[in-house]
Image: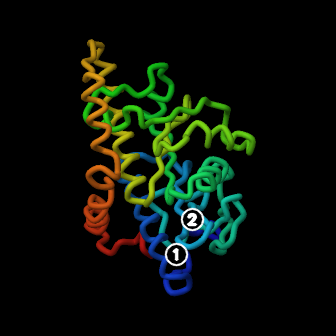
Amino acid sequence: MSGKFSTNFEHLEGKVSAEEWETRVNLAACYRLMDKYGMTDMIYNHITARIPGTHDLLINLYGLLYKEITASSLVRITVEGEIVSKQDTDYGINKSGYVIHGCIHTARPDVSCIIHTHTRAGMAVASMKCGLLPMTQTSSRFNNHLAYHDFEGPAVDLAERERLVADLGMHNAMILRNHGLLTSGASIPQAFNLMYQLEMSCRAQVDAMAAGTDLALPSNEILEKSAHLYQPNVRRPYGELEWHAMLRLLEAEPSGFPHYAA
């Protein structure tokens, strides 16, 4: 590939703060994991992470596959979507990335990372009137801890931001009706773990409903108990322990060196 649509980027380690570089490495790893677990949509969708000690965010270049994203290729933007710094490339950023993400980062200082997907199972459940059913141990995690936001067309209207924030409230997971899924977290590992579990819940529901048999749902008492046990302040913040294994998974790729840290 020629010109400024190349994927060969200047290595930024040592040229940004240590805090920013660590965030870049973990965010790039998150993008690669989303690809590995089949939660991508060509070049679309976004994962953002707040740079510690700042109000700025990191986001992907619009045009790269998730499996091409590296720590150095990520773009630094303000919460209003203005580019602070990016590589010398003709790739830009997707406006929907900061329409959806920027307002949540602004309203929720507890949120460090936001993930948005258009997976097949996620879009299917987002189009069901029943929404996500608490039919498995995995989906029970979201019982009374899941928000919904009605579809308003492609997310390019800045006026939608207020409604997005209001619908999310203090939840960390949301189904965007007729659209897809969204999770957030106090860290990149926590947001990723929550998205993985939400995606698996949707896949299980689509499979079970396709079987055409009656579904067995746990009692409300059991669902409340189960959901409580998954909350980050009860036993442990899910995602942190798992993250080390996720990084080892990437580092065991045939290429050896973790190219996401390039």
At horizontal 35% and vertical 51% (from top left) the residue drawn is 232
Query: Considering the image in quadrants, where does the N terminus appear?
Result: bottom right
Q: Position of residue 28 (x, y in %)?
A: 45, 65
Q: Position of residue 136 (x, y in %)?
A: 27, 30
Callout 2 amino acid: Leu
Q: Is residue 31 visible?
A: no
256 lies left or right of 3: left
Element under disc 1:
helix
94 above or below 223? below
Question: Quick one: 40 or 219, which is closer to the camera?
Answer: 219
9 lies left or right of 204: right
Task: Tell me how the rendering is colored.
Answer: rainbow
Question: Quick one: 2 or 137, which is closer to the camera?
Answer: 137
Q: Position of residue 8 (x, y in %)?
A: 54, 74
* Tag 2 near tag 1, CB within 8 Å: yes
Within 10 angstroms of label 1, few (less than 14), some, or many (20 or more) residues?
A: many
Query: Considering the image in quadrants, where does the C terminus appear?
Result: bottom left
At horizontal 56% and vertical 58% (from top left) the residue drawn is 109
Within 10 angstroms of label 2, few (less than 14), some, or many (20 or more) residues?
A: many
Element under disc 2:
strand
Of mark 2 and mark 1, the one earlier in the sequence is 1
* Mark seen at residue 50: none
The answer to which quarter of the image holds residue 163 is top right
Residue at image mark 1: 20
Count the numbered circles shown.
Answer: 2
198 above or below 48? above
Q: Position of residue 164 (x, y in %)?
A: 62, 40
Q: Is residue 94 visible?
A: yes
What distance separates the C-alpha of mark 2 from that of mark 1?
9 Å
* Mark seen at residue 58: 2
Callout 1 amino acid: Glu
191 lies left or right of 102: left
